[in-house]
Image (spheres, rainbow, N blue to C red):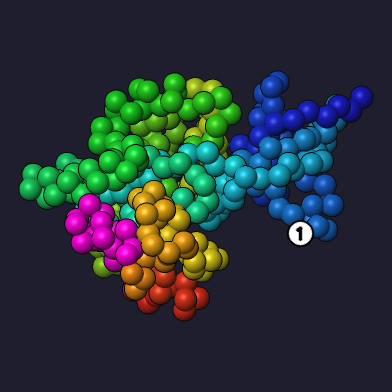
Amino acid sequence: MNKQVEGIIVSSIAGFYDVQTSNGIERTRARGIFRKNKQKPTVGDRVKIQLDEHGMNYLVEVYARTNLIGRPAVANIDQVLLVISAVEPEFSLQLLDRYLTFFSWQKVAVSIYLSKADLVSAPQLTEIKQNLNYYAQLGYQVVYNWEDFAQNLATIIKPNQIWTLAGQSGAGKSTLINHFKKSLKQKTAAISSSLNRGKHTTRTVQLFHIGHGYLADTPGFSAIDFTPIKINELCNYFVEFKRVSSSCKFRGCQHLKEPKCEVKNLVEKKQIKQSRYDNYLLMRTEIEHGRLPEYLK
């Protein structure tokens, strides 16, 4: 006798979908209707499956997603642990702002983890921490010690929440997830110094149980596409811009050449970081031109 149960897709390999249900993991296939409707089930999807006593389990429904992020993608992400390296690849405020703005657009909360802090000099680390302190004041959790964070992660992740790692290739995501999940043996790769980029070492997406929720292991993606964002909405994804925009003279102020703009006022007073404003302008240009700028390809 067939019955239907609900669950979460925790891995996808060669047309098979492993679904975590209340009774354990069930391996399933997608019915042809998904292909016909050009709908591809994705890791993180909340689904309904039909169990067959002969082992022919099928996905029968994929519930609406809150988001779909990454390449390969993960659905329904609640929180991102953004891994930013101190060196190899070089620490970059521009890259950090790109990630934070992208995830703000996707309505996903972000914690920032600084990796490879032991590979830079004390003065360099002090400068990086001074920069990151600005983001901590904005409300982002900034993590320097993965051991303390890992000990608390099981209680931080809420039931059925999906967390994912993100960050540039080579920043140390696979190394970090090895710490989180000792049984996982992800191969780590040396940095390609000629490109200052890492080689992708993670090929598929999987969700792993951490506490009562899940942690996704995903490949890094260094290029983020902002072109789908409406240009007049971009400023809303800079949290400090949005907080003070009600004090601008003009409603819908874009913080460019408008008079009595509170954002520009606070930039001049150094209460808003100059690099944040400069990166905002770069992103606007990118959206206007409808393509990634050459320096980020």
Residue 194: x, y in percent? 26, 67
Where residue 4 sits, quadrant-wise, is: top right
* Magenta span contains residue 277: yes
User: Is residue 112 or residue 83 the one in the foreground?
Assistant: 112
At 47% across and 72% down in the image, what residue appears?
Answer: 287
| Dot 1 amino acid type | Lys
Report which residue position mark 1 lands on: 38
Position of residue 182 measured from the top left corner of the image (x, y, whole percent): 40, 28
Reply above or below: 241 against 113.
Answer: below
Residue 141 in percent (x, y) is at: 33, 37
Residue 141 to residue 182: above or below? below
Does 37 sit left or right of 201 as displayed?
Answer: right
Q: Residues within 10 Å of mark 1 (few under 14, many from 20)?
A: few
| 221 relative to 133 in the view: left or right | right
User: Which residue is more in the foreground, 252 or 29?
Assistant: 252
Q: How many numbered discs sit on the rendered protein?
A: 1
- The quadrant the N terminus occupies is top right
Please give the name of the residue rendered at 45% of the width and 33% of the height, measured from the top-left corner.
Answer: 184
Secondary structure at badge 1 equals loop
Q: Which residue is drawn at the image coordinates 53% and 66% (left, top)?
A: 230
Looking at the rendering, the stretch of residues picked out in magenta corresponds to: 260-281
Decide if residue 109 is in sight here.
Answer: yes
In the rendered view, would you say 297 is above or below 40? below
Left or right: residue 103 versus residue 30 is left
